[in-house]
Image (tube, grey):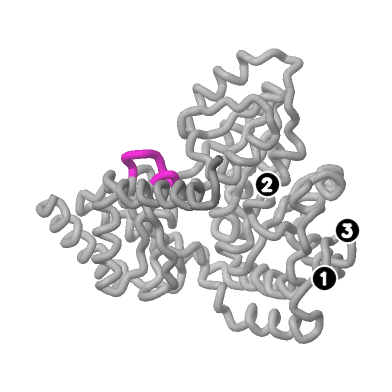
Amino acid sequence: MPGFAQFEERIHRHVRALEDAGLRRKLCPPAGIDLSSNDYLGLAAHPLLKQKMAEAVLEEGCGSTGSRLLRGERESLEGIERRFAAFKNTDASLYFGSGYMANIGVLATFIERQDVVLTDAQNHASIVDGIRLSRAKRVKFRHCAIDEVAQKLRALPDDTQKFLVTESLFSMDGDFAPLADYAELCRETGTVLIVDEAHAVGVYGASGSGYIEQTGTGGEVFVSVDTAGKALGVSGAFVSGPEWAVDYLIQRARPFMFSTAPPPALAAAMDASLTVIEQEPQRRRRVQELAGLLRGMLAGQGVDIGRSQSQIIPVMLGGNDRAKFIAVELQREGFDVRAIRPPAVPQGTARLRVSVNALLDESILQRFASILQKVTLCSAVSS
């Protein structure tokens, strides 16, 4: 009969396999110039956010003491949900402890076993896992392939409840979904459109509410999932949509019902974040300008940046070991850049995920591009 020793050896065997494949990961704290985080607007350490959160901790304490259906509900959480709903131009919002929990909650609650879900092949893990938990039929389509989506949706019976789930800005490729085309197609076929705005909220749209706003597709989107731990600089995620949909999540979404509520002081920090986004639109203009500059530099050097159109710029390298080598060399030069390898990206597409934030400047990006070119050439010669 297998015992603990055999179990431990099994785990060690799995870890050795990861090591052999160049896929073993280590936890590394921030060091050097930030070219890897999702703090696109530079709000995580903004003085106003820190001040408001510190004041709220002194007033409300560190913990919420229970789920929101027990003793964890707070007026501050209700208040930030109302403000975020207005920001997204929706009826209501519901705050979850993380974007992962929000996607699990939305997808496993609204989608049922008899339904059909179309999902982009590059959608991130929380979307994949949420659809799996729904137990519905999952139909994967090629990345942003609108013609394939149209063909698959039109082939389904009229009495099938259909869903289309996509990121608006893809977290590893840095390109945008064709939301306007999806919205028109979903309207035509009676398909429910769910959009993850994790990497777009705060950066795109006239008010900064995201790519849904920028494309004018809000009327066709059922709910959006908007992470607060990226451009907003705080933590958690909002689900925004109709009042009846938010109420249903409160009744049925297990990640919401059975999780201790987030610390109430986070609401004060998020309120400050929305104020900064409203009052300092130059931050989102700046990050987009810098991202365009770096994309141009790298493309001019012949660097493969995939389909990037945003502040997320992949440097496509292919091999796991090569990606690790180049990341380490750049870190030695003072740049915090990380290697991204499977399963975060498909096999054979290891890369650096370079992300631009509003606190950088042109000289830093020029120096990074120059050093990247040298390191890349060195790695090609050594291989």
The answer to whether residue 168 of the structure is visible from this angle is: no
Q: Quick one: label 2 or label 1, which is nearer the N terminus?
A: 1
Q: What residue type is labelled 1?
A: Thr
Write down the residue under mark 1. Answer: 65
Residue at screen point 72% across, 46% down = 105
Q: Name the residue under label 3.
A: 69
Residue type at mark 3 is Leu
At 60% from the left edge and 63% from the top edge, which residue is drawn? Answer: 229
Mark 3: give few (<14), some (14-19) or many (20+) Cα within 10 Å: some
Relative to the observer, which residue lies in front, 246 or 256?
256
Work out whether 72 lies above or below 210: below
Tell me the element at label 2. Answer: strand
Asked whether 3 or 79 is in front, the reply is 3
Drawn side of residue 76 relative to residue 199, left or right? right
Residue annotated with mark 2: 224
Q: How crowded is mark 2: few (under 14 residues within 10 Å), some or many (20 or more)?
A: many
Q: In this view, does 65 lie above or below 207?
A: below
Q: Give the range drawn in magenta.
A: 342-349
Viewed as shown, does residue 150 lie left or right of 257?
left
Residue 207 lies in magenta, yes or no?
no
- Does the segment drawn in magenta span residue 343? yes
Badge number at residue 246: none
User: In x, y percent, where is residue 180?
Assistant: 58, 36
Image quarter in which the N terminus is found? top right
Q: Nearer the viewer, mark 2 or mark 3?
A: 3
Q: In which quarter of the image is residue 230?
A: bottom right
N-term-proximal mark, 2 vs 3 = 3
In the current view of this chain or complex, which residue is farthest to the front?
1
Q: What element carries label 3?
A: loop
Which amino acid lies under the numbered mark 2 shown in the image of this protein? Ser
